[in-house]
Image: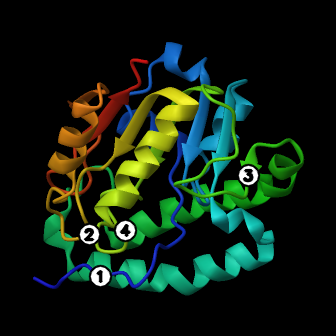
């Protein structure tokens, strides 16, 4: 079995349906003010906005033009599909037929994002920013989501970065949800328990929650952090 390795954080877009299941978003949740951290080229913002929802996405990739983002997607898609083929046994092939099907569905989501990007920037829905510093007032949102960034890239970001990032999300939203808890090797990140211990000691409510989404084997949990202050 090969190691699943990525040299850097790659732009990889997921759909509204994936977000809803990864973060156990109820109809009531979807009617709240939502912040997506590290959303990249996901179509969640576009699809939720089309449904009348309130959502803002932040990502440093938003400093670039649609053409530049598309180029980066094209450059990294082959790396993703190569890793998926080399590590097929680490995934459940129930919602996708094959690694190629994964890429095709992700590319469809990213195409929705690219078509929406310029309008979304004008409307303030896509903001060029990155954790662990967010350009928003305290409790400006109800829910903050972080998909496939924290914990997944444990080799790229330190434990202190994770703690600072989660505290910053908790500053701008009382309900923080992070998915998955696995690292790139498909194992529970070594940061999960230290993060939980640190935040609980500072009176945050922290829980690991089973969700109705599992593509990576064992990757069916999110971390939920509630700011009790």
Query: Which label was assigned to residue 127?
Result: 3
Q: Residue placed farthest to the left in the image?
A: 1
Is residue 167 shown above or below 226?
below
Is residue 61 shown above or below 149?
below
Q: Residue at x 43, y 18 (%)?
A: 229
Question: Which element carries disc 3, helix, strand or loop?
Answer: strand
Residue picked out by circle 2: 184
Residue picked out by circle 4: 157
Give coordinates of residue 143: x percent, y percent: 52, 28
Is residue 14 shown above or below 228?
below
Quick check: 68 left or right of 37? right
Tell me the crowding category of disc 2: few under 14, some 14 to 19, or many 20 or more residues within 10 angstroms, Cα based. some
Residue picked out by circle 1: 5
Q: Are marks 2 and 1 in contact (CB under 8 Å)?
A: yes
Q: Residue at x 16, y 85 (%)?
A: 2
Q: Are marks 3 and 2 in contact (CB under 8 Å)?
A: no
Question: Which element carries disc 4, helix, strand or loop?
Answer: loop
Calculate the distance from the C-alpha at mark 2 to the C-alpha at mark 1.
7 Å
Calculate the distance from the C-alpha at mark 3 to the C-alpha at mark 4.
22 Å
Q: Residue at x 67, y 34 (%)?
A: 55
| N-terminal-most mark, 1 or 4 | 1
Calculate the distance from the C-alpha at mark 4 to the C-alpha at mark 2.
12 Å
Q: Quadrant of the N terminus?
A: bottom left
């Amino acid at each position: 079995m090969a190691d699943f390795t990525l040299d850097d954080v790659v732009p990889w877009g997921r759909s509204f349906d994936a977000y809803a299941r990864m973060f156990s978003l109820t109809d009531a949740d979807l009617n709240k003010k939502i912040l997506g951290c590290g959303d990249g080229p996901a179509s969640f913002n576009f699809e939720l906005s089309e449904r009348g929802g309130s959502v803002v996405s932040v990502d440093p990739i938003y400093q670039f033009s649609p053409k530049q983002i598309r180029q980066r997607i094209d450059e990294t898609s082959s790396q993703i599909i190569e890793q998926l083929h080399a590590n097929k046994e680490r995934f459940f092939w129930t919602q996708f037929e094959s690694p190629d099907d994964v890429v095709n569905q992700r590319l469809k989501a990213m195409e929705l994002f690219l078509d929406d990007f310029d309008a979304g920037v004008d409307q303030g829905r896509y903001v060029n920013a990155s954790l662990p510093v967010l350009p928003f007032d305290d409790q400006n949102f109800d829910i903050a989501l972080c998909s496939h960034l924290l914990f997944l890239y444990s080799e790229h970001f330190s434990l202190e970065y994770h703690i600072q990032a989660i505290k910053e999300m908790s500053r701008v939203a009382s309900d923080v949800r992070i998915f998955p808890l696995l690292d790139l090797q498909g194992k529970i990140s070594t940061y999960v328990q230290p993060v939980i211990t640190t935040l609980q000691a500072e009176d945050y409510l922290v829980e690991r929650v089973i969700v109705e989404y599992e593509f990576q084997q064992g990757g069916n949990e999110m971390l939920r952090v509630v700011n009790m202050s």
